[in-house]
Amino acid sequence: MKLKLYQLVCLALFFAVTGTLNVAAQGCVAIRPMSCGGTDFSNVAGLFGKGEWRVSASYRYFKSHRHFRGDSEEEERIENGTEVINLANSVELGVSHSISNRFSLAVNLPVIFYDRSSLYEHYGNSTNSNPDQLRFHTGAKGIGDMRISGNYWLFNPMQGSGNISVGLGLKLPTGNSNVNDDFHKLNSEGLDSLVNKPVDQSIQLGDGGWGITLEAQAFQSISTRSMLYFSGFYMFNPQNVNKTLTRGTLDNADPLIAYHSIADQYAVRLGINYMALPQQNLSVSLGGRIEGIPAEDAFGKSEGFRRPGYVISAEPGLFYTLGSLNFNLSVPVALYRNRVKSVYDLADPNGNRHGDAAFADYSINAGVLWRFGGHHTASMEDVPKFKNT
């Protein structure tokens, strides 16, 4: 069977760089949509031909509602109906171009739709302040933070059965980090009134800072049909805080968390891809991923309000090729969730303070990529590892 080298390798690499970072450390742990954590077909560049273009669209959905403090779930929140529910729908648009068969440039821009419902942000969780246990919604929609990146394959794509790509990117603060909405409050007469103020950090469209991303991708063939894949990224946000007030006011606000923090974030993915139906260009994958926000940034201060934490997920996936179109579907399922202590929590002299965060059970990621222009890589028969496949 004569398959193109780029067809098999891209199956592994699409899984290595897909699975959007809108993210699976999703929910109140406010990780922004980001390419190596997003269904980022556009970064699968070096194994495409010189001069080739790729246009992609990647969709992600999740619902976060399970509250964790440390790695212990507060199950009573759902039992009592006081859980916070974040619904996230996003589409990440990407364009990339191969300058050579090793080096490519990419631009990615997420379009985000958030909905958040809660009791505590409005009338409150208690039956005294909110006897009818009314739940209200806030939301945010618009573009997120843009990323521009370059990626380079360390070895000749036409030689060997594996390769490693390294990348450097710039994150631009194009997403609104100070989205406001109406919150329901009871006035002194017990009547409903509206207060307009910033929405929760977890549904802000951007973080308000410039960032630098370091990325790595790798694959290694282990048979004529299967490959191991790896991808990872770390986004450095050296700025400390943005201008968004955590509580909408400085009155009685703790200076340490008066403003939203501009936090680092990270993701690592590892797994295996298997071409189940070669004639139909259908591949399956199974991997694991970890993604999250650290309590302290690599550079600069880590003040401001943030909910640090991470999630470890199992990630099954499907990939299908139809001519110059590529389709991907993956569903990361959370296995372990941990809301770690923040700088603010650690500042408690008694060591008792530990905030919570809501996480999702799973996310749904689906993407499509269209390749055109340029020259594709050679046939698999031209590479010794893949002869006679």
Image (tube, grey):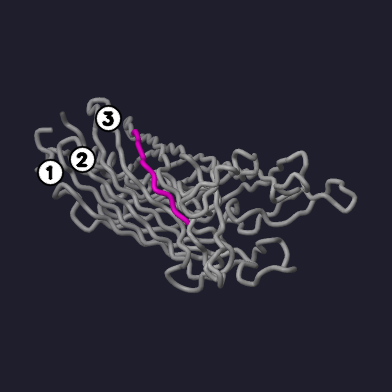
Residue assigned mark 1: 383
Task: Mark 2 or mark 3: name the one nearer the start of the chain.
Answer: 2
Residue assigned mark 2: 5
Residue 60 percent across, percent down from the top left: 48, 41
Q: Residues within 10 Å of mark 2 (few under 14, many from 20)?
A: many
In this view of the protein, can residue 108 be seen by the observer?
no
Q: Is residue 320 above or below residue 177?
A: above
Marks 1 and 3, how far apart in space? Answer: 19 Å
What amino acid does circle 1 point to? Val
Q: Nearer the viewer, residue 302 or 170?
A: 302
Residue 369 percent across, percent down from the top left: 39, 39
Q: Which residues are magenta?
A: 309-318
Dividing the picture into quadrants, the one containing residue 344 is bottom right
Q: Residues within 10 Å of mark 1 (few under 14, many from 20)?
A: some
**Which label lies toward us, 1 or 3?**
3
Q: Nearer the viewer, residue 203 or 2?
A: 203
In this view of the protein, can residue 186 be seen by the observer?
yes
